[in-house]
Image (cartoon, grey):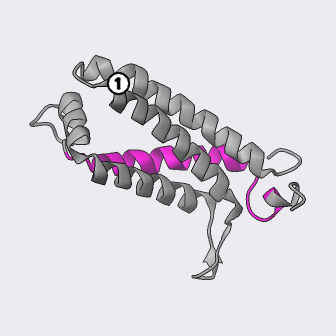
């Protein structure tokens, strides 16, 4: 972890990692599904940037206020990534189904678009690990803001 935990550092790290993941989707999608339109490609790019930023900001919660339990990075990042990918899959199910068919075929083993929830959990775990490692977590991340 850096010397001074910072919410800004967490958010920047999350957005940079989200940008990298989103760029991979933006660049690779036409190779797997040539019919993918520009709005889907841009949506994937912007979605993962937003996901990274949210994971960065949520790093201030190291304790769950309602359940009164510890909220470690590996639960926080995994749950947030899974939830956000569930939301996009739920609202864009036809497009996500077409992406999964293009990647794995109609008779593939993982053709359900809800496998993207597991993908979001993995990316959320990675983003929160790196953001926590270099940006800290909990109350100390906002103490540097002098709010």
Q: Residues within 10 Å of mark 1 (few under 14, many from 20)?
A: few
Q: Which residues are magenta?
A: 112-141
Q: Give the quarter of the image for residue 134.
A: top right
**Could you tell me residue 129's position as x and y percent?**
63, 48
Above or below: residue 3 compared with residue 21: below
In the image: residue 112, left or right of residue 133: left
Above or below: residue 139 compared with residue 48: below
Please name the predominant secondary structure of the magenta segment in the image: helix
Number of labels in the image equals 1
Question: Measuring 62% from the left and 38% from the top, which residue is drawn there?
Answer: 15
**SS of the residue under disc 1:** helix
Above or below: residue 37 compared with residue 12: above
Residue 129 lies in the magenta stretch? yes
> Considering depth in this image, is 20 or 70 the residue closer to the camera?
20
**Could you tell me residue 130's position as x and y percent?**
65, 43
Residue 140 lies in the magenta stretch? yes
Question: Measuring 86% from the left and 62% from the top, which residue is drawn there?
Answer: 147
Q: Identify residue for label 1.
A: 38
**Could you tell me residue 100's position as x and y percent?**
23, 36
Q: Residue furthest front?
A: 39
> Considering depth in this image, is 36 or 107 the residue closer to the camera?
36
Question: Measuring 83% from the left and 44% from the top, which residue is drawn there?
Answer: 2
Q: Give the quarter of the image for residue 94.
A: top left
């Amino acid at each position: 972890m850096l010397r001074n935990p910072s919410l800004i550092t967490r958010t920047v790290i999350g957005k940079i990692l989200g940008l990298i993941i989103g760029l991979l989707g933006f660049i690779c999608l036409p190779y797997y599904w040539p019919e993918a339109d520009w709005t889907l490609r841009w949506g994937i790019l912007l979605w993962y940037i937003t996901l990274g930023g949210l994971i960065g900001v949520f790093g201030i919660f190291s304790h769950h206020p309602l359940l009164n339990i510890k909220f470690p990075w590996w639960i926080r990042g995994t749950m947030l990534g899974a939830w956000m990918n569930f939301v996009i899959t739920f609202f864009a199910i036809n497009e996500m189904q077409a992406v999964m068919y293009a990647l794995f075929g109609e008779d593939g083993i993982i053709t359900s678009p809800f496998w993207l929830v597991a993908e979001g959990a993995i990316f959320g775990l990675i983003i929160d690990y790196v953001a926590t490692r270099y940006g800290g977590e909990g109350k100390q991340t906002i103490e540097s803001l002098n709010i």
